[in-house]
Amino acid sequence: MPEKAVGKKVLIVDDDAFLSGIYATKLEIDGFQVVSARDGEEGLKAAATELPDLILLDVLMPKLDGFEVLKRLKADPATKPIPVIMLTNLGQKEDVEKGLSEGAEDYLIKAHFVPSEAVIKIKKVLKMP
């Protein structure tokens, strides 16, 4: 049985409530504590107050897009060390390169990954067994 991620907190920033709910459920089953935000501004506030172990960040969102959120997270000394995985439907090569060059640890295309595969990536980034 895989090790549970007890005490690890993941912030999901995504305006798609259905999809973020699926990811939250899968993460909680695996023992993660999950915090959700529905837009970029909410995501930045939650990142600063919750200081999660990792952030799953959508790109296309109201108020602030994921690239702007990522830029601001990496500019803030308090949130800079938090690893960010982009989770989006934007799969163009330039979008992937932009996300990685702005400081994202990984870039997952929603259509290509199921939640359990995303959890494997999260555990890898957090250096968990």
Image (cartoon, helix red, strand yellow):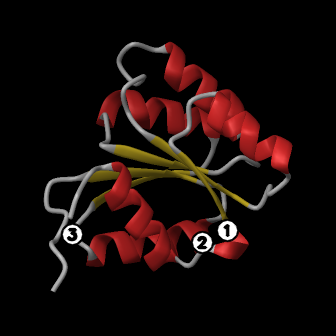
Give the vertical position of 74 relative to 46 (above or below): above
Q: Which residue is mark 2?
A: 19
* Of the image marks 3 and 2, the number of the one nearer the N terminus: 2
Q: The C terminus appears in which quarter of the rendering? A: bottom left
Count of marks placed on residues:
3
Picture residue at 42% right of the left edge, 37% below the top: 46
Crowd around label 2: few <14 · some 14–19 · many ≥20 (10 Å): few
What secondary structure is marked by label 3?
Answer: loop
- The alpha-carbon separation of the residues under discs 1 and 3 comes to 22 Å
Badge 3 amino acid: Gly
Crowd around label 3: few <14 · some 14–19 · many ≥20 (10 Å): some
Q: Which residue is mark 1?
A: 110
- Depth-wise, is mark 2 or mark 1 nearer the camera? 1
What secondary structure is marked by label 1?
Answer: helix
Badge 2 amino acid: Leu
| Contact, mark 2 vs mark 1 (Cβ under 8 Å) | yes
Give the vertical position of 111 relative to 129 (above or below): below
- Residue 4 versus residue 48: which sits nearer the camera? 4
Picture residue at 58% right of the left edge, 21% below the top: 72
> Can residue 29 be seen?
yes
Q: Can you give x and y, in whole percent of width and height, for residue 78 in the image?
A: 35, 18
- Depth-wise, is mark 1 or mark 3 nearer the camera? 1
> Can residue 63 be seen?
no
Picture residue at 56% right of the left edge, 30% below the top: 103
Badge 1 amino acid: Lys
Q: Can you give x and y, in whole percent of width and height, for residue 69 in the image?
A: 62, 31
* Of the image marks 1 and 3, the number of the one nearer the N terminus: 3
- The alpha-carbon separation of the residues under discs 2 and 1 comes to 9 Å
Q: The N terminus appears in which quarter of the rendering? A: bottom left
Q: Which residue is mark 3?
A: 31
Q: Going by the image, does 26 lie left or right of 69?
A: left
Picture residue at 46% right of the left edge, 14% below the top: 76
